[in-house]
Image (cartoon, rainbow, N blue to C red):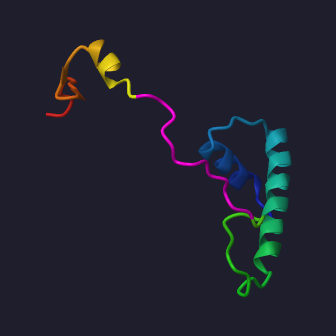
Amino acid sequence: MSLDEETTRNIAHLARVAMSDEELAHIGADLSRILDLVAQMDKVDTHHVKPMAHPLHMAQRLRPDEVTESDQRERFQAIAPATEKGLYLVPRVIE
């Protein structure tokens, strides 16, 4: 697919990128090559390929779900401007 200068200029405008006419020509050629590659990859038959979340077969390492910090609620609420029944009171922001 070949992008003309006007299309490249429009893409640059939408991306909010200022470019000179020389840069537009180079970027237009690069974008055209990228779109050609995408079109080529689109022709590959992938209906038999199972979708993957990650290209490597690996499991995520998880740490044990254990408490690692002590309860400091009383300490933190002692310095809060306003609390009630263990909750922080804040000004109303939605009317």
The residue at 24%/13% (across/down) is 81
The residue at the far left in this view is 95
Q: Position of residue 57 (x, y in %)?
A: 76, 67
Q: Quadrant of the N terminus?
A: bottom right
The residue at 52%/48% (across/down) is 65
Q: Quadrant of residue 3?
A: bottom right
Tag count in the figure? 0
> Residue 18 vs residue 23: left or right?
left
The residue at the far bottom in this view is 48
Span highlighted in magenta in the image: 58-70
Q: Position of residue 27 (x, y in %)?
A: 81, 47
> Residue 85 vs residue 54: left or right?
left
Q: Position of residue 38 (x, y in %)?
A: 78, 68
Which one is in front, 23 or 60? 60
Name above or below for residue 41 compared with residue 61. below
> Residue 63 vs residue 76: left or right?
right
Q: Position of residue 48 (x, y in %)?
A: 73, 87
Magenta stretch holds residue 48: no
The residue at 33%/25% (across/down) is 73
Is residue 1 visible in the rendered structure shown here? no
Which one is in front, 64 or 17? 64
Task: Determine the main secondary structure of the stretch shown in magenta.
Answer: loop
Is residue 7 visible in the rendered structure shown here? yes
Q: Quadrant of residue 82?
A: top left
Name above or below for residue 83 compared with residue 30. above
The residue at 77%/85% (across/down) is 45
Magenta stretch holds residue 67: yes
Q: Quadrant of the C terminus?
A: top left
Q: Quadrant of residue 92?
A: top left
Name above or below for residue 71 compared with residue 46. above
